[in-house]
Image: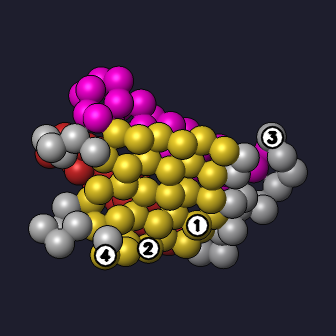
Amino acid sequence: MICADFYRSSSDRLTGFRVTGHAGMADYGHDIVCASVSSAVMMAANTVTEAFKVNAEVSVEENEIVLRLVSDDKEYGDRVLLGLLTHLYFLSDEYQDCIRVRVIDA
């Protein structure tokens, strides 16, 4: 199962995410759920760090990516993360046994 945890600040802004795991729908390289999530996560991370130049810590490991906004100006980062959260919620509705999405108060 893919687990996507989003972190929310006391001011109700998204400050980061951690995505881990595999969907398990098909063999490696043929799993459309994993491909969909991976593509969306990488686009969000690249949009935050490269397009909007928001200061963020990004860690990529085997089966895990973590992004935490560290910039004082988190407006654009928060919006991109909200877009990713929304996208993953829609995917989790369609593939309920493959994706779990949570928002955690940080």
Q: Is residue 32 magenta?
A: yes
**Contact check, label 3 and label 4, Cβ < 8 Å:** no
Three-letter amino acid code of the residue under disc 1: Cys
Residue 3 marker: 1
Which secondary structure lies at badge 3?
loop
> Along the polypeptide, which appears first: circle 3 or circle 4?
3
Left/right of residue 50 with respect to residue 63 in the rendered view? left
Q: Residues within 10 Å of mark 2 (few under 14, many from 20)?
A: few
Distance from Cα at disc 3 to Cα at disc 4: 34 Å
- The residue beneath circle 4 is 105
Which residue is located at x 37 percent, y 72 percent? 103
Which secondary structure lies at badge 2?
strand
**Residue 30: where, in percent of width, then height?**
80, 44
Q: Residues within 10 Å of mark 3 (few under 14, many from 20)?
A: few
Say above or below: 67 vs 102: above
- The residue beneath circle 3 is 29
> Which residues make up the magenta segment?
30-55
**Residue 13: where, in percent of width, then height?**
19, 61
Three-letter amino acid code of the residue under disc 4: Asp
**Residue 106: where, in percent of width, then height?**
32, 71
